[in-house]
Image: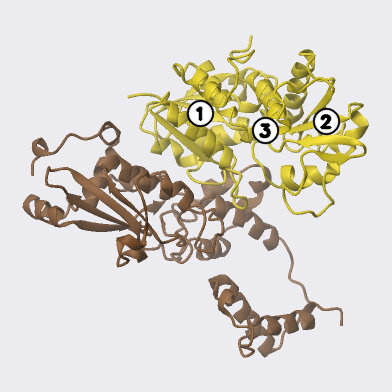
Amino acid sequence: MGDALVVAAHGSHKNPHSARPAVDHAGTIRSTGAFAEVHEAFWKEEPSFREVLRTVAADEVYVVPLFVSEGYFTEQVIPRELRLDGWDPGAWASDGLQASAATFPARDTGQRVHYCGPVGTHDAMTDVIVRRAETVTGTPEVGPGTGLAVVGHGTDRNEHSAMAIEYHAERIRARDRFDEVRALFMDEEPEVDDLTDHFESENVVLVPLFVADGYHTQEDIPADVGLVEPGAPPGAYDVPASVDGHRVWYAGAVGTEPLVAAVILQRAADAGAAVGPALESVRADVGAPPVADGGRRR
Amino acid sequence: MTDDASPPLPDAVRDRPAWRAFLHWVEGADESGSDGYRGALADGVTRTWGQLLISARETEDGNRRYDLRHVDDDRTPTDELTIHDEPAALRELRRSDAAGRYRPLTSAPTLRRGWALTDLDGAALCRAVETCYPASIPNWHREREGDLDVTHWRETAERQTGIYDLVDELAGDQVERLARACCVDSQCLKRRQWDESPDDALDVPRGDGQFPCREPCSLVVSAAREVALAEREDECDDLSLSAADRAQVERVLEAVATGEVDGVRDGDLEDGANRLRVRYLREKLFGDG
């Protein structure tokens, strides 16, 4: 019997679009045949984290959290609800960015669960953010003469949420591709409200490191930045939009980018899954070049 | 019919005892003798599962094929339905009701009609059923085998953290009300097997569903949070109701709770849930004047 992949995401009781990235990326991976089974599981939808494992026939299960950072959901909620026997956040030996994978039996089903670090902190996510800047501007060589803002939620319950944003911003900055790269936040300094204060470049691309489009990415941030008037309908912004003499390309949640499927696969591969040629085939299908600097960290 | 004479099982079914048991149940294999089973299957047998109507038949070459549609479409001519041949079609169909509203609870009795999946093999049938009602087959199978792992309210509530940490404040009548509000057949087609605790059964009817509910779901826990916050409040003494106002409040709550409110006509001023009547009451109870 082959191995199984479970893509674990938040989901929503109110927003039907919240589950979309998990469903789409799982579908992409399913079609590669790299795993005998590919399932989605959700905190707020069904199948729930609590019951997904009993729908899986495989004995070896790779669980990849489709979350942007390490923290409350990846360290407490998902392992608890999956009933990972012996889980302790220390198993990841991470200070917020290094989680790769740790293996535990599930108490109710006995399956061996390879519990992977979140998608958002993987090095390959840097490529996805850049890819998003390319697709939203329609310019494969976007960079020169352009500023890039990676935007995150900030504090909240999650002490590590800012780290992933700053990490990817720093990695993109080091590539010397964009004139300026900034990490900005909704709930802490430096704030995305003051977007144009942070950029000299006339052209600015704004990529939110969020998994799914919803209130934050479609209403909150567009209004904060001044892409729309407060209270405008969801998603009613122009691309590009004009803000204080800057042209701003707003990308929406990066989690919807098809290349995220490759990061999910990479997470499972890093944990030991034999994904065969699937990784390259997914990248090729979305028109991405072969792995730039993704892959196992350290 | 002996197992030896059965066509080989697809791998996906062979690896899943729950699916094997489910297909046998669909085919009526547990209830009739082998001859009756064979004969009935040749003629076609049907089962309901939530709001799904499952039809099974045996083809001339001895294979089993299955059709799936909404239980209320049992008499709808097939050519009036939208036909799908992939279980994945249910991923989209299950996500919104007939009015296009998002369905966060797959087991709410609001599955939309007008579609059919036809000529499925056993694995495809099980995948379709699990897409529509996730985990329903393994939980049903565990229950039949006598090892359904029920998690009762108290344990679920005490496990919660973050914004749901407070739901363990609810107990006794409050949990009864919560289950009566959320978990009866008019709201969810799973059969509730959890209680307040193993020693404290709830009086609320468990429901008549085919497949069990083994634990309060995320929608119930979310509702519990709002209810727990409200239950912290003291009674207020600045609101007094006449008998007629009280009756109208009761009628408005009834109309909203049952969904009848959508059908209350604008001109039906005798109905306390009529919009103009409710606007008057709002003005009287909470208006500036």
Badge nearest the viewer, 2 or 1: 2
Q: Quadrant of residue B205?
A: bottom left
- Give, as a three-letter code, the residue at label 3: Val
- Rendering quarter of residue B20: top left
Where is the C terminus of chain B found, in terms of image quarters? bottom right
| Mark in the foreground, 3 or 1 | 3
Q: Marks 2 and 3: which is nearer the front?
A: 2
Dot 2 and dot 3 within a common chain: yes
N-terminal label among 2 and 1: 1
The earlier-in-sequence mark between 3 and 1 is 1
- Given residues A46 and A92, the one toward you in this image is A46
Identify the mark at residue A254; answer none if there is no mark.
3
Q: Are marks 2 and 3 in contact (CB under 8 Å)?
A: no
Chain designation of label 2: A
Which chain is indicated by disc 3? A
Q: Colour of chain B?
A: brown
**What chain letter is assigned to the residue under label 1?**
A
Residue positioned most to the top: A298
Residue at image location 23% in from the left, 50% down from the top: B25
The numbered dot on residue A204 is 2
